[in-house]
Image (cartoon, rainbow, N blue to C red):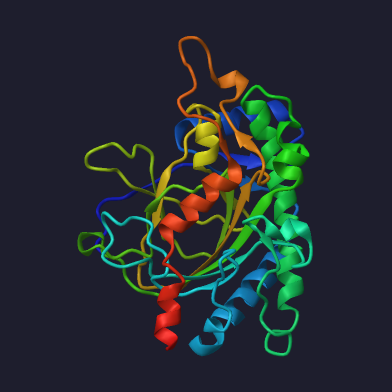
Amino acid sequence: MVKQNIQTSFLNCIDLSNPDINQSVNLLKQACLDSGFFYVVNHGISQEFMDEVFAQSKKFFSLPHKEKMKLLRNEKHRGYTPILDELLDPENQVHGDYKEGYYIGVEVAEDDPESQKPFYGPNRWPASDILPGWRETMEKYHHQALEVGKAVGRILALALDLNASFFDGPEMLGEPIATLRLLHYEGQTSDPTKGLYGAGAHTDYGLITLLATDSVSGLQICKDRDAKPQIWEDVAPLKGAFIVNLGDMLERWSNCVFKSTLHRVLGNGQERYSIAYFIEPSHDCLVECLPTCKSDSNPPKFPPILCADYLSQRYNDTHLDLNVYKKQQV
């Protein structure tokens, strides 16, 4: 990968243990208006446990390809996503992303009526004799990361001049669509001039994303997606921190006051692991312009839409049809 004088982006750091909530709100608001990305530290998840989650992730991706394909993602987006499965930037990518992943969502039993909803249902789990303790580790992390997301959501609500508990209700993050995704970049070298990317340029679909990374760099952001040429900046890994970014749903909700920023991953020849946690409101949440983000001179830019409908469309647009894999097995 040829480095083209890429600057490192300076991101605000939100300390969840800071008793001065106004300072946190101001830092977050500044970040949301500027880049849509910020660090979160002192979030309550221990470094020892984070190390364990990464270790278990590596164990899964180290399995033989045949074993991983037994857990291929289903229609509910649970399970394994092979290399090239996801195409995020079709205009500029020759192939899909050079990454493999594993989706884990909110666990709902098959006989529960709630499992009929598009993003609820049973997860796909590796057999406990192959990866002992794997499921327990991931379920614990899923639960703890959601609590971090809710804490960020309260500061976010205040930054939007809403009540701090705005995102806590059952129709919001009380019954969320929360998806954990383990990611592994095998060590290819990206070359944007040839359309080869670890992850193509994209914005996230939902409310907010919490990203935990190892020490290998690769994440880049573009603050102005309409600029010609686009200016990309590196986001440095910060040990013990989440890198948090806003999604399209929040940009829509805030009437474009807050930014959902274009980002991508360029491989530099080193193997890289990261763990994304996508937080969205409930299936039945109606995403419509917030009262604090509209006025006579700034009317709503988007029509209201149900969260489940919006997310289903976005997932289907960026992932291969599962029938492709069925044909390969014939």
Q: Is residue 50 above or below residue 170?
A: below
Q: Residue at x 57, y 49 (%)?
A: 209
Q: Is residue 268 left or right of residue 29?
A: left
Q: Is residue 163 above or below residue 182?
A: above
**Residue 96 picture location, percent across and down:** 35, 66
Q: Is residue 24 visible?
A: no
Q: Point out the image quarter for the C terminus.
A: bottom left
Q: Residue at x 50, y 26 (%)?
A: 255
Farthest residue, direction top: 296
In this rendering, does residue 204 appear at all?
Answer: yes
Place residue 165 in its image quadrant.
Answer: top right
Q: Quadrant of residue 231?
A: top left
Q: Residue 146: percent from the left, percent from the top?
A: 71, 52
Quarter of the rendering occupied by the N terminus? bottom left
| Left or right: where 2 falls relative to 300 | left
Q: Residue 161 lies in what quarter of the image? A: top right
The one of 271 and 174 positioned closer to us in this rendering: 174
Q: Position of residue 6 (x, y in %)?
A: 31, 50
- Residue 276: percent from left, percent from top: 57, 58
